[in-house]
Amino acid sequence: MPTRTLASAPHRFNLRPLCAALALSLSATAQASPSGVVISQLYGAGGNTGAVLNADYIELFNAGSAPVSLAGWSVQYASATGSSWSNKTNLPAFTLQPGQYFLVQQASGSNGSALPAPDVVSSPAIAMAAASGKVALVGSTTALTGTNPSGAEDIVSYGSTSNATEGSPTGTALSTTLAAWRANNGCTDSNDNAADFITAAPAPRNSVSPFKPCASSPAPSPSPTPSPSPSVTPISQIQGSGHTSPLVGQAVTTRGIVTRVNNNGFFIQSDTPDGNAQTSEGLFVFTSSAPTVVANQLVQLTGTVAEYNTGAASNALTASRPITQLTNVSGLSTLASNQALAPTPLTLPATQDEFEALEGMLVQVTNTLTASQNYFQGRYGQVTLSAEGRLIKPTNIHPAGSVAAQQLAEANAQRQLLLDDGSSLQNPTPIPYIGADNTLRAGDTLDGLVGVLDYGLSTASNTGLASYKVHPTQAVNFQRAHPRSAKPADVGGNLKVASFNVLNYFTTFTNGQTASGASGQGCSLGGSVAAGNCRGADNLTEFTRQRDKIVQALLGLDADVVGLMEIQNNGNAAAQNLVDALNAAAGAATYATVSLPVAFDATVGGSPTGTDAIRVALIHKPAKVTPQGSALADTHAVHNRPPLAQAFATPNGERFTIVVNHFKSKGCSDASGANADQGDGQGCYNASRQAQASRLLTFVNELQARTGDNDVLVIGDLNAYGKEDPILTLAQGGLQDLIAAFEGESGYSYVFDGEVGYLDHALATAGARAQVSGVTHWHINADEPFVIDYDMNFKRSPGTGQCYNASLTACSPDLYTATPYRSSDHDPVLIGLNLLKSLTGTAGRDTLVGTPGDDVITGLAGADRLTGGNGRDTFAYTGLRDGSDTITDFAPGVDRIDLSAVVALLRGTHGVTSTDLIASGHIQLIDSAAGLQVRVDTDGSAGPAGAVLLATLSGVHSSRIVAPRDLVQ
């Protein structure tokens, strides 16, 4: 929504700098320049950092009624309060026609777009000040003298600190995004710069630009008659058919029906449209404070046409699509009330030009829309929406730079809209669009959206993405199409491994205190130790909230081994703190930390836990796995967060190795060269991540050689989406992408810029891949709004109703609960492994005894005596000849009888079609003195064939058997 910058809100979306309110003449005034030639536009920030254009310029204009030769003339410059005018440009013998412009280029730089072809390029160039200065048009080439010289055709003092002979200076300091414009296309000249000039986005005109002749002004009579009512300019003419208004800088009078009132302005729409589908009938009117109009009023007003760039001057997206608006509003009057308009249908996908033609208009979206991102819902009242389902990050499913990735990026842009609450106020109360369970989940849907179409940033960065947005005018009701899950999907197997980025779990807080009660402490980053290096909770209260959420998430995962990212790099203190809290909930000694690693190659040097403030860590269940040897870290210089490897053994003797990783992030701080954003969708530092991926392959190969075990799982936050270069490098090196294998294109763990993809990975060597039973992301974080997490900075203190941050004047309700939801910003990954020990008998009578762990025991033919031992054991039968076994220690609810091969035989060879084989008597459970007998009858209880005894479960009664749990069919 159209807003204005607040000092306390550097990251607010669609922030609009306030233009100075200057009185404008609606028709040409008497010419104060003797010749009629005036300075019509000035810009002094060309080429500066953030500049819109790459050069300073002085624009001249013939406001008179006769041609004027510029031969022997000059433009001259002095500082805001200076007296030296030695900086001058001599003009050529050019005859300037009435209404014609003339562009003089001055000093240039490396930032911003090029000017239109200048009529003169000054040499030497004048380096004009960006904010304030003085420019004179002189009818000779002799330099002026003095702070307030005489003898100039025209003189303009721009900014607020300049001194001049023409009334007061323009008043508003110019900037990288603001130029000084003489009003009415250059026709206004009252000899008072403050009255004659406005500030607006720079848009220089040259001698081939359309002429804008000024109307002559009759001399006032002794008894002037009242001025006639100003003519009304239709909104469609103000908007024009392009991306910018043809009337920028002009004062216009227009009328329209109020369609939406925001806290700093309102939208109007024409009650008499022109029928041209290329011209918008809507317009935003900026009032800076709460307007007095109400919806459905027909109003008339006068204002200055301006184009506003909603992002930074360097943001190519927003610079190419500024918002047309009216500023400096006067003469607002209500002509009628209750003039409701019907919304114009808008169907997605839509091109940028199709959106532009509806800018500022009341629309109704015909599609079902899906909530794609809710990160800023509580902070700014904004939700990213998409048509045709959720938006997938192009590089999650297509290689970066590929035609398919580019096409998907373009399609995503056409399917996306931003839902905006229409207020510049932060931390809105109540929080817009919150639904059941105090959440709005990404994936929830919305039908029949009606509101006014606008354009602006869709991220917290003024250099980030922008999109068209809708300010709703009717109630917004989302449907819960993507409900929460209390537990992750079943991944099978007998052992579970998880990967979880816990979003800066620090036991040292930003206030210098620690979880153990110490104060005056800091966090380590490189060679420094300071509280400013801490990235997690601000204090113990926030930390407790953070920890409680993470513990609930870990309990829900119930993994036997967990790789953690973003643990404070303070030895094992933070990891142990988390384990202590986890064991307090799960039971004493349920989990333990893996010891700090040693360098895999001591000759390489470097810290095994790295130089960053965060590190990776491992925790495990000692009852399920035992670490084998020391944990190892690859301290190669390419890693500032070294990968952590640990070999484990299960009670049955099976072994595997886990490598936990956290690759370099996509943020662009200090990025340069190959690490700068290459514009291919992979963000910054892709080259570093590729180097880390290559080194990881070497590390995995070396681990396999050292441990003698080829079964390696690679997990962690690799900060690269599924088809980006680092992941393709790992795949080419032999690691198999388990997310792609089990979740396909629907896999995701993170939402950014409204698009989903997976940064959190699970990869496996060929040997480990054969043991994977399932993989899933548990969607407890990426789909949840940021406003429900532990952070209290923008919320009310529990129980007081006051803002927790006393410096804020507005804060949101605290919706925090100690649940897994929004425990982090990344979804955890869960992997199921079948690490079973197989014991197989012979055709004769065998005695088979399992391990202390999980076993699969297959006796085959003969009357075998089978003992599983501890663990979760499976007794498998391959056919009807595997009979008359005795299972000595079957534990219902723990062990299982696998009859799947026998059932396949019944259905395939014997044609059994019954859906309940126990009810039909094909599988029989018969109690006997020796225990529960498991029998199979090929023709069921109704047939003549006898039942075959497969096994007797010693000491077990049929009442303890639950078929789906204990019998695999």
Image (tube, rainbow, N blue to C red):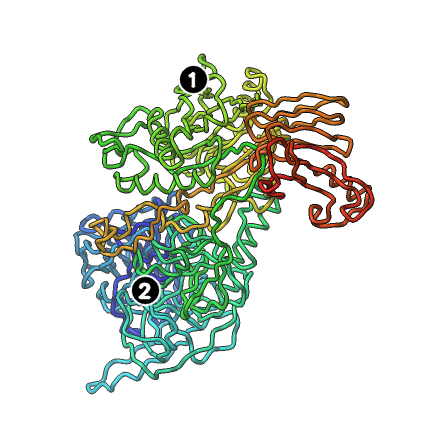
Where is residue 447? Give x, y as percent. Answer: 50, 66
Label 2 element class: strand
Q: Which residue type does callout 1 highlight?
A: Val
Query: Label 1: which residue?
Result: 598
- On the question of residue 660 being in view, the answer is yes
Label 1 element class: strand
Name which residue lies at 44% across and 70% down: 361
Name which residue lies at 53% across and 52% down: 391
Disc 1 from disc 2: Cα separation: 79 Å
Where is residue 900? Give x, y as percent. Answer: 70, 38
Name which residue lies at 35% across and 53% down: 57
- Asked if the residues shown at circle 1 and circle 2 are in contact, with their CB atoms under 8 angstroms apart, the answer is no
Q: Quadrant of the N terminus?
A: bottom left
- In the picture provided, is 368 more to the left or to the right than 457? right
- In the picture provided, is 740 more to the left or to the right than 11? right
Q: Which residue type does callout 2 highlight?
A: Val
Query: Label 2: which residue?
Result: 37
Name which residue lies at 60% across and 26% down: 868
Q: Quadrant of residue 666?
A: top left
Where is residue 339? Give x, y as percent. Answer: 39, 81
As displayed, is residue 61 above or below residue 562?
below
